[in-house]
Image (cartoon, helix red, strand yellow):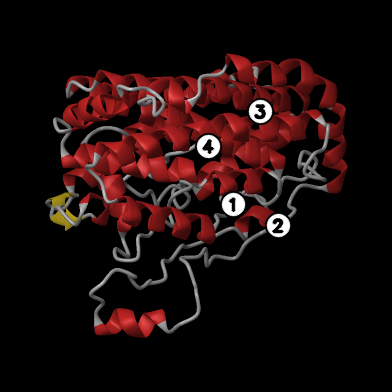
């Protein structure tokens, strides 16, 4: 799944200027995130770091009120009734393992006599890539490597979770196989970055450990309506991000890396198709609650899976990473609005009929949201502060504009 960058712009006025009101259950979902300062384990350590090292382990955490099990129990029957549909319409978007690409298809072959020469060629190509590109590529890779968190999140969803760890329900089979396909993404990018010699792998490994330890609460409330809307949005965001890193790699002359990012983007597109089909089916069988769920998620804003990213040094690492991605146009606030607009069209939100009064208000809110986000982004750009140089531990502390 991955990326997953938050738009550099926040949209605090989306709820205040709208006539649409969320149901009382969702009104309890106001959240804020904070980052707990961590100590560095690198030497030499400062006095503050030494003191922090004496404290119990405490990764950055979600500190908002976490709502659980918001879906009414009777709705569970909908997902049980869709088991056969999922087998016929969801599992077809998985590829047999023997037909899948594997990371070694795109990496130097260690058993080959030409291994060292292949590594040398890889490192020569990477010399042409600028530091800011590596920051974005590393951020994407770290997000992919937090895959255990995403499988855990899917297995919190009522009615579709893998109850045993080896359940044969279509929903459980999908989750495990999706995870297996996604696992190749982080493996491939991790190995490529390691061989490049351009990044500090120990700092990257620390960041991955912190991120997995922090978990995430995307505000989906164990509710598969909310959960599958979230994954639909995220898979498209990842498709866009990896596609843009492929474009940049090509521009800088690393055609192999462009191929790698492109093949990952292709996977994300296929997964996006699967998740959007689930939500499309929910609109078919339960349009009222589904459109209200969509409005709910957009009210709360789609939080990106790596928003608790931390490397032991920079308390604002995710914001700095996001700023670089915004500047390079790898993932931007405009993309955020474009994804919502795409999904509104994909699910034919404007054409929904037979909705309740609350459903119609949710429909109007969602359909009018993309242009509002763009207007807010334009205003924010006009007030944007000058960029400053920020050191990134991932690239040995070198400074780039963020």
Q: Which mark is residue 279?
A: 3
In x, y percent, where is residue 284? 73, 22
Q: Which mark is residue 219?
A: 1
**The image quarter in which residue 308 lies:** bottom left
In the image, what residue occupies the spot 72% across and 45% down? 157
In the image, what residue occupies the spot 65% across and 17% down? 96
In x, y percent, where is residue 53? 39, 79
Instruction: Determine crowd level at label 1: few under 14, some 14-19, many 20+ residues with C-alpha closer than 10 A.
Output: many
In x, y percent, where is residue 218? 56, 50
Q: Mark 2 to mark 3: distance in Å?
A: 20 Å
Q: Which residue is mark 2?
A: 68
Q: Mark 1 to mark 4: distance in Å?
A: 19 Å
Disc nearer the start of the sequence (1/4):
1
Q: Secondary structure at mark 2?
A: loop
Q: Which mark is residue 365?
A: 4
Count of marks placed on residues: 4
Q: Is residue 350 visible?
A: no
Instruction: Determine crowd level at label 3: few under 14, some 14-19, many 20+ residues with C-alpha closer than 10 A.
Output: many
């Amino acid at each position: 799944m991955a990326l997953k960058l938050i738009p550099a712009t926040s949209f605090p006025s989306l709820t205040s200027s709208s006539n649409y009101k969320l149901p009382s259950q969702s009104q309890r979902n106001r959240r804020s995130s904070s980052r707990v300062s961590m100590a560095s384990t690198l030497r030499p350590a400062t006095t503050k770091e030494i003191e922090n090292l004496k404290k119990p382990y405490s990764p950055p955490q979600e500190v908002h009120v976490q709502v659980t099990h918001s879906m009414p129990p009777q709705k569970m029957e909908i997902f049980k009734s869709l088991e056969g549909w999922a087998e016929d319409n969801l599992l077809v978007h998985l590829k047999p393992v023997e037909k899948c690409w594997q990371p070694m298809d795109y990496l130097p072959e260690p058993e080959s006599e030409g291994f060292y020469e292949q590594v040398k060629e890889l490192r020569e190509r990477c010399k042409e890539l600028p530091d800011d590109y590596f920051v974005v590529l590393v951020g994407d890779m770290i997000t992919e490597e937090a895959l255990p968190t995403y499988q855990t999140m899917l297995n919190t969803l009522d009615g579709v979770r893998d109850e045993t760890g080896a359940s044969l329900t279509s929903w459980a089979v999908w989750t495990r196989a999706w995870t297996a396909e996604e696992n190749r993404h982080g493996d491939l990018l991790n190995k490529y970055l390691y061989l490049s010699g351009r990044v500090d792998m120990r700092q990257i490994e620390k960041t991955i450990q912190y991120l997995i330890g922090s978990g995430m609460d995307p505000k989906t409330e164990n509710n598969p309506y909310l959960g599958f809307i979230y994954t639909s949005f995220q898979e498209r965001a990842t498709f866009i991000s990896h596609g843009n890193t492929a474009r940049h790699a090509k521009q800088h002359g690393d055609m192999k890396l462009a191929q790698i990012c492109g093949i990952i983007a292709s996977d994300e597109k296929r997964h996006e198709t699967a998740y959007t089909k689930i939500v499309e089916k929910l609109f078919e069988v339960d349009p009222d609650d589904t459109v209200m769920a969509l409005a709910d998620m957009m009210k709360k804003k789609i939080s990106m899976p790596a928003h608790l990213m931390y490397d032991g040094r920079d308390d604002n690492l995710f914001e700095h990473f996001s700023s670089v991605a915004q500047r390079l146009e790898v993932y931007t606030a405009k993309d955020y609005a474009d994804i919502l607009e795409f999904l509104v069209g994909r699910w034919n939100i404007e054409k929904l009929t037979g909705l309740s009064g609350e459903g119609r208000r949710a429909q109007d809110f969602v359909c009018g949201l993309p242009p509002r986000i763009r207007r807010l982004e334009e205003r924010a750009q006009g007030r944007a502060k000058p960029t400053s140089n920020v050191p990134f531990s991932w690239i040995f502390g070198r400074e780039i504009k963020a």
